[in-house]
Image (spheres, helix red, strand yellow):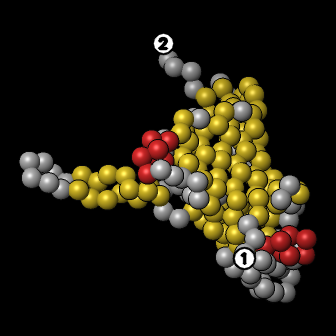
Amino acid sequence: MASKIAINRVTNANIYLDGASMLGKAEELTLPELKSKMSPHKALGIVGDIETFSGFEKLEAKIKLTSYYSDVLVKLANPFKPVQLQARASMQVLEQGGVTREVPVVTLFTATCKNYPLGVQKQHDNVELELQFNVNYCKQIIDGQDVLEYDVMANIYKVNGVDLLAQYRANTGA
């Protein structure tokens, strides 16, 4: 018996900055990528080298604005004040060629803007402003389920609601 095939599709989203909608103001959003740092280990008695987890690399995000929006830019121009960003998408679940349901995909992150582009202006083209962010907190929720939560400053890393750094914090007194 063939297994049931389900395809998930996300083709659009809206971004919120400190709770305010940026509908129509951004062309593209690159969400943070959680990437593990791995440290090599070799020892006598082991026939090969291995890599073990030793932390996470810095998180970054990007937003490409479609023009100048002073309500957005004044919040992002201050590199000393983090902002709360939220991406909200609707994910279609397709089974046997049709959409059987739609579920929310919400990604929350706290970030500070690393750059303030003044833009490129060309005849007949819209101004594009690509803003880059340092991210120190992110959480992703899919269909009401907490999939991932990472807080750099609090040493929290949760997958499916399980805090994988709880013992680390206990051991280090953090």
Judging by the rendered image, the residue that carries numbered circle 2 is 1
**Among all residues in the image, which is located at the extreme front?**
173
Contact (Cβ within 8 Å) of mark 2 with mark 1 = no
Q: Nearer the viewer, mark 2 or mark 1?
A: 1
Q: Position of residue 159 (x, y in %)?
A: 54, 39
Q: Amino acid at mark 1?
A: Pro
| Quadrant housing residue 125 | bottom right
**Nearer to the camera, 164 or 108:** 164
Q: Position of residue 129 (x, y in %)?
A: 76, 76
Residue at 70%, 59% (x, y): give it.
110
> Disc 2 to disc 1, how far (Cα)?
57 Å
Residue at 91%, 71% (x, y): give it.
71
| Quadrant housing residue 59 | bottom right
146 relative to 45, above or below: above
Judged left or right of residue 124, residue 33 is left
The answer to whether residue 55 is visible is yes
68 relative to 103, above or below: below
| Quadrant housing residue 41 | bottom left
Judged left or right of residue 139, residue 169 is left
Residue at 50%, 17% (x, y): give it.
2
The answer to whether residue 131 is visible is no
Judging by the rendered image, the residue that carries numbered circle 1 is 79
Q: Position of residue 96 (x, y in %)?
A: 65, 24
Q: Give the SS element for disc 2.
A: loop
**Among all residues in the image, which is located at the extreme left?**
45
Q: Position of residue 123 (x, y in %)?
A: 85, 87
**Nearer to the camera, 88 or 112:** 112
Q: Amino acid at mark 2?
A: Met
Q: Earlier along the polypeptide chain: callout 2 or callout 1?
A: 2
Circle on res. 24: none
**Nearer to the camera, 52 or 106:** 52
Neighbourhood count class around disc 1 (C-alpha, 10 Å): few under 14, some 14–19, many 20 upward: some
